[in-house]
Image: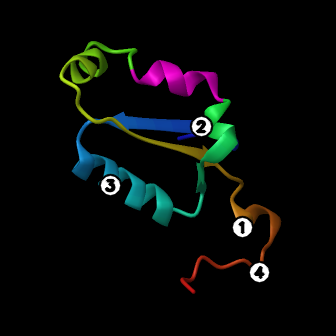
Amino acid sequence: ISRVEGVVYTITDVRDLHEWMVSHFDQFPLFERISGSELDNDPVVAKLYESTEEGQKVSRNKGDKHLAVYRRVEDPRLTDPTFSYQAS
């Protein structure tokens, strides 16, 4: 569970896992993907790549790392009672 405005960071060297996580976060209406300058200015992002032994091992082996960052947004049902999650 994440509070509104909470941030979820995902990073992995497994492309299939990255794509799976991205597809699920993208489909879930209470998260929006963070990108661009906002991501560039986030001090946590740079630390994610080397903060674990596994991350360091992937770097030593010149492997790829796949990052996705999402922000929890307000549930529209709480502010707009006519809102529906129906697919468009």
Furthest-left residue in this view: 61
Judge whether residue 4 can be spotted in this image: yes
Indicate the position of residue 74 as horizontal and vertical percent values.
72, 54
Disc nearer the start of the sequence (3/4): 3
> What range of the chain is rendered magenta?
42-49
Q: Which is in the foreground here, disc 3 or disc 4?
A: 3
User: Which amino acid type is shown beneath numbered disc 1?
Assistant: Arg
For the residue carrying disc 4, how many other residues have a C-alpha within 10 Å: few (<14), some (14-19), or many (20+)? few
Q: CA distance from mark 3 to mark 1?
A: 28 Å
Q: CA distance from mark 2 to mark 4?
A: 27 Å
List x then y, in percent, for residue 81: 78, 74
Q: Which mark is residue 7?
A: 2
For marks 3 and 2 on the same chain, the one whose residue lies earlier in the sequence: 2
For mark 1, does the 10 Å Cα neighbourhood hold few (<14), some (14 to 19), or many (20 or more) residues?
Answer: few
Residue 55, disc: none
Judging by the rendered image, the residue that carries numbered circle 3 is 19
Q: Position of residue 45 (x, y in %)?
A: 53, 27
Which residue, given by chain and number where applicable, does mark 4 sit on?
Answer: 82
Give whichever of discs 2 and 4 has the lower sequence position. 2
Kindly identify the amino acid type of the residue bearing the numbered disc 3: Glu
Secondary structure under the numbered disc 4 in the rendered image: loop
In primary-sequence order, the first of circles 2 and 1 is: 2
Separation of disc 3 and disc 4 at Cα? 32 Å
Residue under label 1, please give it. 77
Query: What residue do we see at 69% from left, 39% from top?
Result: 38
Kindly report the distance in space between the C-alpha atoms of the residues bearing marks 2 and 1.
21 Å
